[in-house]
Image: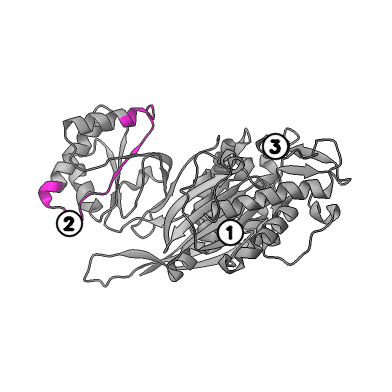
Amino acid sequence: MENQIFSLGIDIGTTTTQVIFSKFTVKNINSAFFIPKVEVTDKIILHKSQIYFTPLTLENNIDFDAVTKIVRAEFEKAGIKKESISTGAIIVTGETARKDNAELIAHELSDILGDFVVALAGPDLEAVLAGFGAGTYEISKSMKERIINFDVGGGTTNACLFNSGKREDCFALDIGGRLIKFNEYGEVTYISNKIKFMIENFRLNIRVGKTAKFIEIKKLTDKMAEMFVELSGFTQLSENTNKLFIGHKNSGAKVNYITFSGGVSEYIYGNEEICSMEAAIKFGDIGPLLGYSIRKTFDKYKDKIITPRERIRATVIGAGNHSIKISGSTVIFDEEVLPMKNVPIVKVLDDSFEGKDIERIKKDISVYQGRTVALAYEGPKNPSYMQIKNMADGIIKVFEGLEQETIIVVVQNDFAKALGQTIKNKLGNSRRIVCIDEISTSSGDYIDLGKPVAGIIPVVVKTLIFKF
């Protein structure tokens, strides 16, 4: 039996805003004589919006009304009603994620558009979405090689390294095309605080209110371009590069191949020669010149560069077409509590649930100050009845004394239905239960649980970071 899920992806970035609509087909791939196993068997992109400049207010915050107008117009163009959307992601990326109203925008936009899943992007999540959307994941899996995707946007560069199709590393830096802006006369109107130290270190004559020379701007973009060589593991990380990491550094692994995505990538893979100030600032920023500098810097590594499937649209395609995960079909849930958004994960390292472990888990839960949390662990592959009973007893003890009305358990192996039913039998109707499996998480993750479709639950696993 097949079912269809419609997904919406919205990317509100530093420079551009994009909308994408997708359709998933989910199907039971086992015969009727076996336990059903539901998988996404087909993904189709139904509609891609035009690429809009991200609207900002006079206070330089995100213009909520203008963004809402864009999204509603794209619904109309796509011929899709908001009631049809089951899942997806709204992500606020790059420097835009640092705007004072970024989190509010994502929540309010989600409320207007309905109960589909919303993802509020941090740098690691953005890197993963771009890596999937660009197609780097599939390339790495098919080639069985270590391939990194650099998504070079307006405010940040988000990198995701895949090794034979498995995510190995994610990181982000303050490198992007909108870190310096110009007016129509070539005068500098904005310099990001993140790169002012570089201008000073290299003694470049780039000042707000002054007309910059092409050679000065190119010296800066050339230095930024060299950082991508370092980040690929071909040369050592410089002190300047280390200062630009957001949150944490990279693992230092040397890659086999590289893909680029994001708006700047259009100039990395293009053929345009940018040799004048007029050509360099055609969009009022350093984006074209940064892309050109990267292209020239990687001339000696041409055999390492692969063209991805998507470039400027990589992140929004990742959000609308790859953020979804499907829970296993052997699950149990009280449907009336779904959907649920931004549920923090408390990861349990093992499934013993002994006295000291329970107290430690309760302490971890208390960090979230009364919020509904999800308890997550891997669990045994083929647990016995006694193991399931002991796990259920331990989970009940963890939630004793807590005001949380719904017990949410996320296990990686395939036994959620048996575990959830055991918990439910012991508690009766005193608590709501959501117990899902075949989802891998880590402490610090958040999950969104969509409304069930054909007995399965659409899930997004994410990292929620707005301020860096």
The residue carrying pointer 1 sits among few (fewer than 14), some (14 to 19) or many (20 or more) residues within 10 Å by Cα, namely: many
Colouring: one colour
- Check residue 212 in the rendering and tell me which mark sits there, or answer none: none
Q: Nearer the viewer, mark 3 or mark 2?
A: 3
Q: Residues within 10 Å of mark 3 (few under 14, many from 20)?
A: few
Q: Can the viewer see residue 444 in this picture?
A: yes
In the image, residue 10 sits, relative to residue 198, either above or below, namely: below
State which quarter of the image contains the N terminus: bottom left
Name the residue tied to disc 3: 201
Mark 1 sits on what residue?
Answer: 314
Quadrant where the C terminus is found in the figure = top right
Closer to us: 166 or 305: 305
Residue furthest to the left: 386
> Which residue is identified by label 2?
382
Q: Position of residue 156 (x, y in %)?
A: 62, 46
Q: In the figure, is residue 436 to the left or right of 44?
A: left
Distance between mark 3 and mark 2 Cα atoms: 59 Å
Q: Quadrant of residue 369?
A: top left
Disc 1 + disc 2, Cβ < 8 Å: no
Residue 420 in percent (x, y) is at: 23, 47
| Residue at (61, 44) in percent of width and height | 94
Q: Amino acid at mark 1?
A: Ala
Residue at left offset 16%, top offset 38%:
393
Amino acid type at circle 2 is Asn
Magenta residue check for 374 = yes
Q: Considering only order in the chain, which callout, 3 or 1, is on the residue closer to the N terminus?
A: 3
Judge left or right: residue 302 versus residue 275. Answer: left
The structure residue drawn at horizontal position 44% and vertical position 70%, both measured from the top left corner, is 142
Q: Which residues are magenta?
A: 364-387
